[in-house]
Amino acid sequence: MTSDTGSHAKLAHMDALAAEQNVPVTVDQQEQIMEIQQTIFGMVARNEGYLDVINRLCQMAEQLLSNSVASVMLLDETGQLNVLAAPSVPSIGHQALNGLVPGPQAGSCGNAVYQNQPVYVTDTFKDSRWQDLRHIAYDFNLCSCWSTPIQDADKQPIGSFALSSFEHRKPTAFHTRVLQVGADIISIVLSRQEQIQAYKKQKKRLQLFGTAIENASEGVVITDAENRIVEVNRYFEQATGYTLSEVQGKNPSFLASGLQDKSFYHAMWQHLLSEGSWNGEIVNRRKNGSLLPQWLSLNVMRNTAGEIQNFVAVFNDLSELKKERDRRIQALEHDPLTGLPNKTRLQEALSRCESECDSCENGCSLLVMNVNNFSLINSAYGLDFADRLLIAITEQLKTLLVGAQLYRLNADEFAAHYPAKVDLDDIFKRVRQLFFLNQIKVDDLSFNISFTFGGAIDTQDLMRKSLLAIKKAKKAGRGRFHLYSGESDEVEQTRRLEYMHWNALLHRALNESCLVPYFQGIRDNHAGEINHYETLIRMHIDGEIYGPFQFLNAAKLSGLLPALTRLMIDRSFAVMEHHQCTFSINITEDDLSQQFLVEYLSKKAEQYNISPDRVTLEILEGVSASGKANNVSQLSELKRLGFKLAIDDFGTEYSNFERILELDVDSIKIDAKYIKNIDTDRTSYEITRAIVFFAQNAGIPVVAEFVHSESVQAVVEALDIRYSQGYLFSEPNPEVG
């Protein structure tokens, strides 16, 4: 024995002596141990999960030693210890311990498994047995650790059961007993779990064998070495109509239908005898003479000497499977209510039609029909009644649309497909007239049904074009018909694709922090300097910089405007924290509708130590003039908190001066369309002059937007407009100043 090994053995001996010198286990303590045993074995008897059982054991052990945690580690196939259970230890602790290699310096658990005996370390900070794990002791304040090996039936270590304390302490006889009892219980639980797993595997195997013989989903025939039937199962009897007594001793060839010739059977037997198995489709005949299509599997059973003892045939009756397949295809491709083929079948038909029309000029025709106000009928009369009405509508359409295949696309939308060019306008008129003149009657109630129609005649892409057409028809009004007309109908689709493109970019920009604030200075014409900035949003993505006019419409349609506003508030506040100037932020009606501004602005002002009176909230004129009580209430509260209000783009909408006075706005920004031509356009000049007159009399400062030239600025100054904003003085920049 080396000196190192000898020192560890000495430490272990001293640990044992220390434990033995403690006060023996009391009656009460013995009862506590008995309670653990009863609880755990009760859980085992109830077939509770083994991990739940071991976790419960750990928890009960922890209750017997204050300020401690219990853990169970198991050896894996590589000889490393990993945490199996430690309910009171955080996952980071599990990760730190996993992969522990047993050894003389591998802590209490590593030593217990290495030495195959209990290890009681009272000071993990100094004990040499914790040398390799000292950092874990420090990180998790594990001051002492007592560990007992978990042994298998051969007394070989398979893991450890430990109590770790956040205090330096020696184990008592009671605690060493708890550890030993716990380790023994865990060994029993793990052994039982192995037995359960082995039993489950064996049971599963037996069930598979039983299924092959008795399961009604497949037939089994066992023949002897001379291929005479010795056994069949119930499925065979049900499928063929023959009983065991009728077929026993016969060669299965009597079942042959005659649809397979001698060469088929010759090849089958050659393969079976050479390879030991054969699989394939075959058609036999039932007792009543009907055909029995089967998927047949044949296997040869040999003894240890290699001699054939039996042949085993397992078959499935394919007739029901084929029927079920047909039923499923029918269900997948047809509307269950009307029986009409669905959108999937239509797309298949259109694909065939398109391929056939590649070389022709006429093409195919598709008419899409949407029942007007069907949702109201659903709501008023109920789903059941609406379903019966749809069936009645379907029957009418079948009668009328001769030469077309009718499809149901969704709840209230049908399509009529013609495999040739037809006059869809004429068909539309006939359908409309028939349903106008003939009411549909359901449950003694009569309805005048009307449709909105969209159609297309082409060789390619009929579905998309017809749907574009009906959307255009709906915009024109109910009961209308629109025939796809090419380029003019693609404009809306292009617009939708653009919105989808910008929506995708916006989500990327939000996730990848590609939205940044730019700052444009606003000049004080009286002082001749810039000390106020407007925050403007820009998108930096894929090496390009995009302005708000490119993506704000998509943001509004996607409901993302409030997210952009929150982002700009946060990032502009972060910049302005380091400057003393005042600044403006644009607020939308969407922001006000979500009612987050008061709380969010207050929170950010406090976070970045920005006084509210440095911040001007710019709102569009329509928001101020709408008079929505909720909007006015929020804006009034923001004013009370010290934030300033400005009306942006004034003069574009209602020009509700009364509302502006009610809100007590701090400034008005005249819309750029008046300012940019104020030096050359008399109307723009007069409108601007009227706004300035009102504002000056109300004591409200005015900002002129889009000041881009000296001549425009000259008129602005002549009208005594206090502030100018535009490229003449400041271009938007990510930096202030």
Image (cartoon, rainbow, N blue to C red):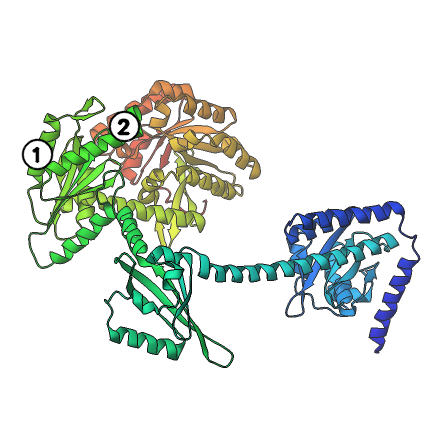
Q: Is residue 676 placed above or below 447 in the rendered structure?
A: below
Image coordinates of residue 525 in percent, x first then y, are 38, 33
Q: Is residue 17 placed above or below 562 in the rendered structure?
A: below
Q: Nearer the viewer, residue 702 or 439?
A: 439
Q: Is residue 7 placed above or below 639 in the rendered structure?
A: below
Residue identifier under label 1: 430
Image coordinates of residue 671 in percent, x first then y, are 30, 32
- The three-letter amino acid code for the residue at tag 2 is Phe
Residue 369, can we see it?
A: yes
Disc number placed over residue 215 in the picture, else none? none
Q: Nearer the viewer, residue 104 or 736?
A: 104
Q: Earlier in the sequence, mark 1 or mark 2?
A: 2
Rate crowding at label 1 as few (under 14), some (14 to 19) or many (20 or more) other CA atoms within 10 Å.
some
Q: Is residue 427 toward the left or the right of residue 297 in the image?
A: left
Residue identifier under label 2: 385
Q: Quadrant of the C terminus?
A: top left
Image coordinates of residue 273 in percent, x first then y, are 38, 78
> Residue at 24% of width from left, 34% of height from top?
679
Residue 131, can we see it?
A: no
Q: Quadrant of the N terminus?
A: bottom right
Image coordinates of residue 577 in percent, x first then y, are 53, 41
Label 1: state its secondary structure: helix
